[in-house]
Amino acid sequence: MTRRLLNNRNLSILVILALFVIMFGWGSVAYTGFFSLQNFLNLFIDNAYLLIIAVGMTFVIISGGIDLSVGSMLGLSTMLSASLVQKSQLNPLLVILIVLLIGTALGFFMGCLIQLFDLPPFIITLAGLYLGRGLCYVVSIDTIAINNSFFQAAAHSQIKLLDNSFISPSVVIALVVIAAGAYVLRFTRFGRTIYAIGGNEQSALLMGLPVTRTKIGIYALSGFCSALAGVVFTFYTLSGYALDGKGMELDAIATVVIGGTLLTGGAGSVFGTVVGVLVYGTIQVLIVFQGTLNSWWTRIAIGFLVFLFCFLQRLFETRKSTTAVRRIAPQPAASASAG
Amino acid sequence: MPSVRSSSQSKLVWPLAALGCLLLFNFFFTPNFFHMEVKEGHLYGNLIDILKNAAPIMLLAIGLTLVIATKGIDISVGSVVAISAGVVAILLGGDLAGQAKYPLAVAIVAAVLASTAAGVWNGILVSRIGLQPIIATLILFVAGRGIAMVLTNAMVVWLYVKPFAIFGQGYLLGLPFSIYLVAGLLLLTALVTRRTAIGLFIESVGINPVAARFSGINAKNILLGVYIFSGFCAGVSGLVVCSTVMSADGNNAGNLYELDAILAVVLGGTSLNGGKFYLLGSMIGALIIQTLTTTIYAFNVAPEISQVVKALVVYGVSLLQSETFRRRIAGVFVKGRAVA
C-alpha cells in the first residue's frame, strides 16, 4: 500500500506539495503578515485566470501536445468582452457566451489542422498566437475600460468566508473548472482516452479509441479554457488591452510541468497543476514581501523550478524505463517513439 | 531518385516564388518600392531597408536552421538576444559623453560569450540530460528575459558609444554593415556544413538519432554543437539589435524573434521533423517575412495587424508542407501521385 502511494505520479505531487508548504511556511516565518487565510486565498484570487488556463493546458500536455496560443486567446477574449460590452452595448451574459464560443471555435479550428493534416501542434498553435494577438488589434488598438454594471459587480463583489476573509466570484469559476477538469480527466471516457493518446497514440488508435475526435476536442477545450480565463481576467482588470496575457502560455506550461505532468504526455493530473499554480503565486508574493528584489526574479525562479522538475522527471523516467526493460525483455529494447 | 543538388534547388523554388510574388505585387501596387538612391555614399531604398531590417532574424535563422535540422527547436533565442544586448549595455555603460566603461572589443566578446554560454546550457539539457528541446529551451526562454532585466536593472539602458553603432547603423562600401555580418556567417556556416561531413551528420541525427549513433556518429556532441551555435548566432543578432536602437531594453529586445526566426526556417523549406536543411531557404524565408511587413507598412495598415497576415501565411505554408494535405488534395484534383 505504501508502495502504491509512493509511486512516481504520487511522489511528484507530494514533492511539489511539500515545496509549496515549505515556501509558504518560510514566508510565514520570515515576514510578518504573510501567514493569513486571506493571503492564502489571495493566491487563488490573483491567479484565477492562470488556474483556468493551466487546467486546459494540462489536458493538452497529457495528450502529448502543446498549446502556445492560450495567452493571446486570453488577450483576444478580454478585447472582445470589453469591446462588445462597451462599444456595442450588448448584454454581458450574451457577450460572455459569444466570447466562449469564439475561443472554442478557434481551438477547434487549430485542433482540426493538427489532427486532420498531421501538422505539428507547436507550429499551428504558434500561428494561433499571432492570429489571436493580431485580431486583438483588429478589435481595437487602444485600451478599453469597462464600466458596465455587471462586470463591475463581478469585479468588486466578495464572497465572505470565515473570519473576514473573502474570495472573488472568479475564484468560484476557477474552482468549478478545476473540479470539472479533474472529474473529466479521471472518470470519463474522454479523459481516459487522453491518457491513452499521450502514452502511445499508435496503440490508442489500434485499441479502437476515438483518437481524432478526442484530439480535436482537447484543443477546443483548451480554447474554451483560455476564453473563459479571458473573461475572468476582464473581471480582474476591468478593461481590455491588446497585450493582456503576453507570455502567459509559458507561465501555464511552466506551472503544468511543475505540477508533475509529463511533457512527453501520458501522465499528469489537474490537482498537480493547481499546486503548480499555487507555487507560482507564492514565489510572486514572496518576492513582493522581500521588497528589494525586482519582480523579474520571479521569471528566473520559475525557469529554475521548471529545470528542476524536468530534471527530476527525467531521472524517474530513465529509471522506470530501465527497470521496465529489465522486467519485460532480456534483449535491448529500442524505445519506439510515437509520432 | 533526384540528386541532392537538384532536390535542394527544387526546395528553394517555393520560397523564391513566394518572395517573387510579394515583390511583383509591390512593383505594381506600391509606388517607388524599387526606388534606390545614393546619399552620402550609401545606398538607400526599400530593398536595402528590407535587407537591413531582416538581418537580426536572418542571423537567428542561420543557427536555428541547424537546430531544426536535428529535429530540435530553440525558443530561447529571443531571450538570448536580450541577454546579449544587456551584457553589451552594462559593459559599455550609459555614459552620456560616449565614454565606454570597458573597451568595445571586450564588451562585444563578453556579450557573444554570454550568449554562447546560454547555448551550452541548452545543449547540455538536450544532449546530456535528454530533455525535449522545446522544454529545455523553454527554461531559458522564461528565465533569460528575467536575467536580461536583472542585468539592466529593469531599465532601458541608452548607449552613446559611437563606434558601437556600426553593427546596426553602419555602412561599408555603400551597404549596411549588418548585411556583411549575415553574409559572412552564412558563408562560414555553409562551408562548414556543406564542405565537410558535419552537415550530413546533422541531417542524419535529425532523421534518426539511433541509427546515426549506430553508424558511428556522436549524436550527443552534434546536438550540443548546434545549440551552442544557435546561442552564438543569437549573441551576434543581439549586438545588431542593440546597436540599431543604441539601447538595451530587456523587456522588448528580441521579443517574439524566436517565432519569426522559426517561421523563416520553416518557410525556407526546412521541415520541423528534422533532416534536410536549407540555409539559403531560411534566408529567403526571413526576407519574405520582412517584405511582408514592409508591404503592410506601405499600405498604412496598423503594423500590429500584420500578425494576422503572418498567421495565415504560416497556416498556408504548413498545409503545403503536410504530406497528408497534399495527398488529400491530390486525391481530389489529380489522379496519381502528388508532386512534392
Image: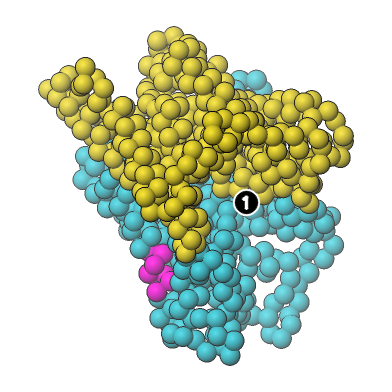
Q: Circle 1 marks a residue in which chain?
A: B
The residue at the point 56 percent across, 44 percent down is A248
Q: Which residue extends farthest top?
A: A208
Q: Is residue A162 above or below residue A192?
A: below
Asked whether A174 or A121 is in front, the reply is A174
Residue A284 seen by the camera: yes
Q: Colour of chain B?
A: cyan
Query: Chain in yellow?
Result: A
Side of B150 where B336 appears, left or right: right
The residue at the point 32 percent across, 37 percent down is A18
Is residue A24 found inside the magenta-colored segment of the image?
no
The residue under label 1 is which amino acid type?
Leu
The residue at the point 27 percent across, 53 percent down is B221
The image quadrant where one finds the C terminus of chain B is top right
- Which residue matches tag 1? B16
Please provide the residue range marked out in magenta.
Answer: B110-116
Q: Which residue extends farthest left?
A: A330
Q: In the rendering, at what x and y percent does residue A338 appear? A: 37, 27
Q: Is residue A249 above or below residue B196?
A: above
The residue at the point 41 percent across, 16 percent down is A204
Q: Is residue A86 above or below residue A325?
A: below
Residue B77 seen by the camera: no
Neighbor class of circle 1 (other Cα within 10 Å; few <14, some 14-19, many 20+) is some
Q: Is residue A160 above or below residue A184?
A: below
Q: In the rendering, at what x and y percent does residue B136 appear? A: 38, 47
- Mainly helix, strand or loop, the magenta region? helix
Asked whether A319 or B177 is in front, the reply is A319
Q: How is the image coloured?
A: by chain
Side of A86 where B7 appears, left or right: left
Q: Quadrant of residue A20?
A: top left
Is residue B111 found inside the magenta-colored segment of the image?
yes
